[in-house]
Image (cartoon, grey):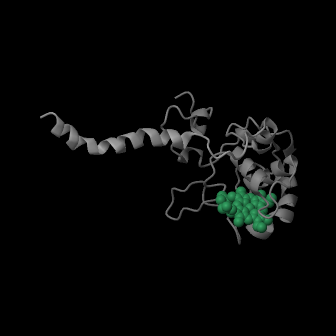
Amino acid sequence: MWRTPLLKTAWFLPILIAAVVLPTYAQSPTYGLGRPASLEEIKAWDDAIHPDGRELPPGSGTAVEGAKVYAAQCAACHGKTGTEGPNDKLVGGQGTLNTKKPMKTVGSFWPYATTVWDYINRSMPFNKPGSMTADEVYAVTAYVLSLNKIIREDEAMNAKTLPQVKMPNRDGFIGDPRPDWESPHSRAPETSKQ
Ligand code: HEC
């Protein structure tokens, strides 16, 4: 009598075995390709800047200096004052996306000035990324911030001052609720006390 129920349920055994065994195979390195990256190789790619700016390199620049960099290397794509295009507008949007006609710009969208530095450093000019010196990136970042009226033209941006710049839409973002995830928002000095 006991055999019948067993036979009836036996159909799923192969599926059960497959479900347990296959993932184990999928995880084993069986392709024999590649090798672990060396520390030097990782270092060459590891150029991300945290919101608190801890990795920012030495160097400094003001918007006055950045205006020259901008005119020579950015204006052709972003317009003379950062609003004319043909590519992304960098200026405007009233410091928020919470309007009837939200406009994403550095001034209205980006939560951290350090991230603007990081982005420009690694990806602009679009046609020659990574070609600028740290001083040039500080200067042109300062210029874009001053066009957005976030800093004054004569304020020097460097590893110390840039993280202190409060972007207009900093508080327009919702932090990631996962407690085990080191969110940039949980790290920001003014929210870490909560
Ligand atoms: C050849 C054209 C070109 C040049 C030159 C160029 N950019 Fe860009 N830029 C782009 C394009 C295209 C994007 C959008 C890229 C994307 O969305 O992936 C962009 C995006 C950006 C953004 C992000 C805008 C946003 O909020 O989405 C910033 C900031 C920026 N550029 C700054 C600069 C600065 C500073 C320079 C000069 C050092 C520069 N760009 C030169 C084409 C250019």
The residue closer to the viewer here, 44 or 20, is 20
| Quarter of the figure with the N terminus | top left
Where residue 125 appears, x then y in whole percent? 79, 61
The residue closer to the viewer here, 188 or 150, is 188
The residue closer to the viewer here, 67 or 9, is 9
Query: Which quadrant does ligand 1 occupy?
Result: bottom right
Left or right, 133 with respect to 124, comes to right
Reply above or below: 169 against 158: below
Indicate the quadrant where residue 40 lies: top right
The residue closer to the viewer here, 57 or 78, is 57
Where residue 161 appears, x then y in whole percent? 77, 39
Left or right, 147 with respect to 19, comes to right
Q: How many marks?
A: 0
Residue 75 can be seen in this image = yes
Reply above or below: 132 against 77: above
Indicate the quadrant where residue 96 lies: bottom right
Left or right, 73 with respect to 1, comes to right
Left or right, 21 with respect to 3, comes to right
Query: Residue at 52% across / 41% down in the picture?
Result: 25
Query: Residue at 39% across / 40% down in the picture?
Result: 17
Query: Residue at 52% across / 31% down in the picture?
Result: 180
Where residue 175 appears, x then y in whole percent? 52, 41
Where residue 121 appears, x then y in whole percent? 78, 51
Residue at the extreme top: 193
Residue 81 can be seen in this image = no
